[in-house]
Image (tube, rainbow, N blue to C red):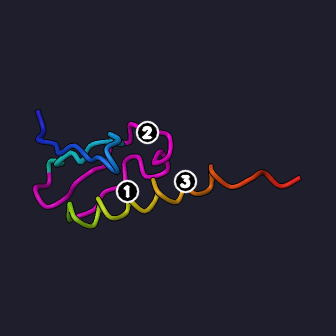
Amino acid sequence: MFDSKIIEVDGVFVGAAIITGIATSLRFYAAHDSVRSLHNVILPDLAVLRAHVTRAFRLKGQQDRRPARV
């Protein structure tokens, strides 16, 4: 089994960073619809991965709160 790190944003579980067979890379497993576009993204650094996921989660939340255009 590969090692993984849980990723939460604002107290919401959004997915996990899974250490791949290559020890220097992490694959993101998206568990929340707001970050589904990042599913299977591979990055070398946990901090960078968390920053991308956080940005996507919050951006999606802002878009959901906007009134619909008619």
Could you tell me which quadrant the N terminus lies in? top left
- Please state which of residues 12 and 19 is positioned toward the viewer in this rendering: 12
SS type, badge 3: helix
* 6 up-or-down from 23: above or below: above
Identity of the residue drawn at 50% across and 40% down: 33
SS type, badge 1: helix
Residue 26 drawn at (x, y percent): 22, 54
Count of labels shown? 3
Magenta-tinted stretch: 22-44
Identity of the residue drawn at 46% across and 58% down: 56
SS type, badge 2: loop
* 43 up-or-down from 57: above or below: below
- Badge 1 crowding class, 10 Å Cα cut-off, few under 14, some 14 to 19, many 20 or more, is many
Q: Amino acid at mark 1?
A: Val
Q: Is residue 65 magenta?
A: no
Residue annotated with mark 3: 60
Residue 65 drawn at (x, y percent): 63, 51
Which is nearer the N-term, disc 1 or disc 3?
Answer: 1
Residue annotated with mark 1: 53
Which is nearer the N-term, disc 1 or disc 2?
Answer: 2
Which is nearer the N-term, disc 3 or disc 2?
Answer: 2
Residue 14 drawn at (x, y percent): 36, 42
- How far apart are the alpha carbons under marks 1 and 3? 11 Å
